[in-house]
Amino acid sequence: TYNNDLYYRYDAEPINVKNIFQLFQQVTIGNDVWVGRNAVIMDGLTIGDGSIVAAGAVVTHDVPPYAIVAGVPARVVKYRFWKKIIEKLLNLKWWDLDEKLLDDLPYDVEESIDVLNQRKSNFYENSFPV
């Protein structure tokens, strides 16, 4: 008889397919991340918030927030924003905000950050009156 629960490797004992992911460390992918087609991310790595992993890249190291990585092995090609803007975006954590706050934002990133910070403070002041 054939047992569907087992996967046989010629160099090891049979392993239970249901538990195969226990052999690998978890990959952590941040918010607002884009991963291109056929990209490979090695186990145990962290892809920072806002990062872009190019198509076909092989990521062998952690990717910092808002970095664009490409190549084999993947290297930081550039960052999406200046360091000051990256810090503001990470502090803002816009992906956790109420969707209503994200409507009709200006096109400029710095201006959008300022508008969101203002909306955020107004929203929470009005949501939880003292």
Image: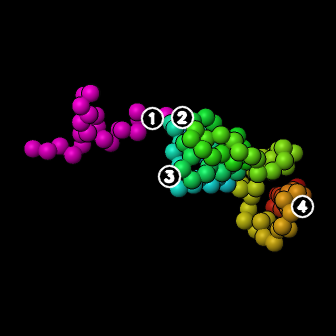
Pointers 4 and 1 in contact (CB under 8 A)?
no
Q: Of the residues shown, which amino acid type is indicated by label 4?
A: Glu
Image quadrant for the C terminus? bottom right
Q: Residue at x 24, y 36 (%)?
A: 8
Pointers 1 and 2 in contact (CB under 8 A)?
yes
Mark 4, other Cα within 10 Å: few <14 / some 14–19 / many ≥20 = few
Q: Residue at x 54, y 50 (%)?
A: 56
**Residue 49 rendering spot, x and y as whole percentages:** 69, 47
**Residue 39 rendering spot, x and y as whole percentages:** 53, 49
Q: Residue at x 14, y 44 (%)?
A: 2
Label whose residue precedes the other's in the sequence (3 or 4): 3
Q: CA distance from mark 1 to mark 2?
A: 8 Å
Mark 2, other Cα within 10 Å: few <14 / some 14–19 / many ≥20 = few
Residue toward you, 60 or 109: 60
> Residue at label 4?
111
The numbered mark at residue 44 is 2
Q: Write down the quadrant of residue 123 in the picture.
A: bottom right
Q: Residue at x 76, y 55 (%)?
A: 94
Q: Of the residues shown, which amino acid type is indicated by label 3?
A: Asn
> Residue at label 1?
24
Pointers 1 and 3 in contact (CB under 8 A)?
no
Label 3 element class: loop
Label whose residue precedes the other's in the sequence (4 or 2): 2
For this view, does 103 lie left or right of residue 37?
right
The numbered mark at residue 38 is 3
Label whose residue precedes the other's in the sequence (4 or 1): 1
Residue toward you, 56 or 51: 56
